Amino acid sequence: MSVLVVGTVAIDSIETPHGSAPQVLGGSATYFSLAASFFTKVSLVAAIGEDFPAEHRKLLADRGIDLAGLVVRPGGKTFYWKGKYHEDMNNRDTLEVHLNVIADFEPKLPAAYRRTPYLFLGNSSPTLHLSVLDQMEKRPELVMADTMDFWIETQRDELLRLLPRLDGLLLNDSEAKLLSDEENLIRAGRKVRELGPSFVIIKKGEHGSFLFSQDGVFVLPGYPTADVVDPTGAGDSYAGGIMGYLASDTSPPPGRLRRAIAYGTVVASLTVEDFSVERLKRATRAEIDQRLEEYRKMLAF
Amino acid sequence: MSVLVVGTVAIDSIETPHGSAPQVLGGSATYFSLAASFFTKVSLVAAIGEDFPAEHRKLLADRGIDLAGLVVRPGGKTFYWKGKYHEDMNNRDTLEVHLNVIADFEPKLPAAYRRTPYLFLGNSSPTLHLSVLDQMEKRPELVMADTMDFWIETQRDELLRLLPRLDGLLLNDSEAKLLSDEENLIRAGRKVRELGPSFVIIKKGEHGSFLFSQDGVFVLPGYPTADVVDPTGAGDSYAGGIMGYLASDTSPPPGRLRRAIAYGTVVASLTVEDFSVERLKRATRAEIDQRLEEYRKMLAF
């Protein structure tokens, strides 16, 4: 099965306590599609500017990612983000954001994409997510979306319209609390699930994640990584690993969803070991499978 | 095998977003010994004042906890702590502390205790820990200690003398970073282990814990608890569950240590479901075993 991701492709400039990486490849759809490409065929919808380096496009194409939906907007520049991580790397400051070509981008799905069975709506406005869903000729087998505090605060009504149309919602701990008005994360996850999605994943960064589904609560710690160089893209790689694995495995839930989350965790743990997408570039499926087995052993008692 | 704990028995007044519990039973040795008593025989060394309610002593005695080392200091009052938890309950403010009888308490082990095979040194000064260790007639089979930021900052030399004499050290994430001068917790855990203990457990509160041993890293998330009423004593219950289980199971490591940590996690998850020791009072070993199995299932993928 193939996966369609609608998200951002960006140029990032990153500073962490381990060094800096100016003008590197970033964006939610970039990390997502590279992560998912270890498992299945991926198509990407995003906007870039004329300045977007050919080498980055080549990297994505070489991984077999379908770029028919990667729109070059004439006269514009690629979305740019500059950020600096704190000493503990769980926090970061945004130093610069230039939306550039994505400021008024309204994704139009190529005709060939409108029947893709797995759809991931990368963090963007609920309005945009609803518009993408409306463009699908057929309701996909599985739709998962990412959201964030900004949309919960500014487009709550639109988000509440979106949620019943999703299979899965991905959000972090503080966002889950904000959306549910619950301090306890277990209650928050259950309450968000009542808003529509059949499963809810709450991300806790290095502390792992919770899955809430009809089968109850599933909990996984983060993969213990001694070499965190750059956390950028961890969440999107996690999502890509989950969706990519789900699309590649047609066995029945809940085992499948749990394995998918474990794969997402492992792929994210690779992403953070180097700047930008460097670690994902070097990774192999065999390495991911090996780390998954180590992870499984680490959790056994 | 029996377990000896040296720690505090206290009167607490607790406020949380769920209510308040004035003048209730608390203290590290209290939570530890109640938790450990589900698994094995426990002896307790601590000081109390003449004001200590008879019902609290009875509660401990009824659980089979040996109180020969519970010293009543004439003319003194029991250690008192008053604290208030924030809305998210990961943080709390200490409103009052009256050390009272523990201010100058130098534990003397009853002769019958000096050959106890399992020794837990509850959070106290490294000087006191060293003195207790020196009183043992025979090196215990297993010694585990808890420590905190205050001792790392004020008695680092004494702590560094203590560490090689321990089997296990228990500390939380910020304390591990402080002791090791490492921001990454995996590196921090490994570095603390190089200071002497054969295993190191880093507690991350609701996010679970890491075990560092000769068998590498073992990681467990917290048990997902929807009903957190009062987090007081979670860490001491965790330690009690670990030591109690270890003393009751003589199978070879590492499986034994991992199971012990899982048991500690589960016992701590019970403790926080009510104020003070109320939930531990109601708990049974069968309930703990059942929750352990649920926990195991939640982690499986």
Image (cartoon, coloured by chain):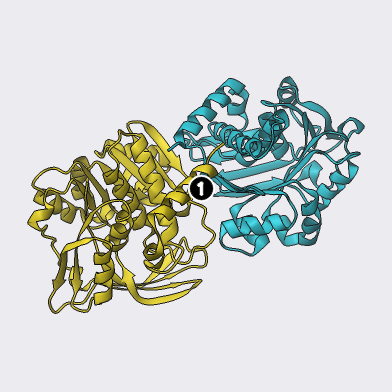
Chain colours: A yellow, B cyan
Q: Is residue A265 left or right of residue B212?
A: left
A266 or A211, nearer to the observer: A266
Residue at the outermost front position? A286
Residue A166 lies, in percent from the top left, at: 22, 43
Where residue B195 sits, quadrant-wise, is bottom right
Assess disc 1: are there few (<14), some (14-19) or many (≥20) residues with their C-alpha within 10 Å of its C-alpha. Answer: few
Residue B118 in view, yes or no: yes
A104 or B125, nearer to the observer: A104
Find disc 1 in the rendering and name its residue. Answer: A294
SS of the residue under disc 1: helix
Residue A209 position (above or below residue A111): above
Residue at image position (16%, 54%) is A127
Three-letter amino acid code of the residue under disc 1: Glu
Q: Is residue A268 left or right of residue B5?
A: left
Residue A67 position (above or below residue A77): above
Question: Which chain's residue wears label 1?
Answer: A
Residue at image position (68%, 29%) is B34
Residue A20 position (above or below residue B196): below
Residue B102 lies, in percent from the top left, at: 80, 43
Residue B87 in view, yes or no: no
Residue B139 lies, in percent from the top left, at: 86, 41
Where residue A111 sits, quadrant-wise, is bottom left
Residue A79 lies, in percent from the top left, at: 25, 71
Q: Is residue B223 left or right of residue B113?
A: left
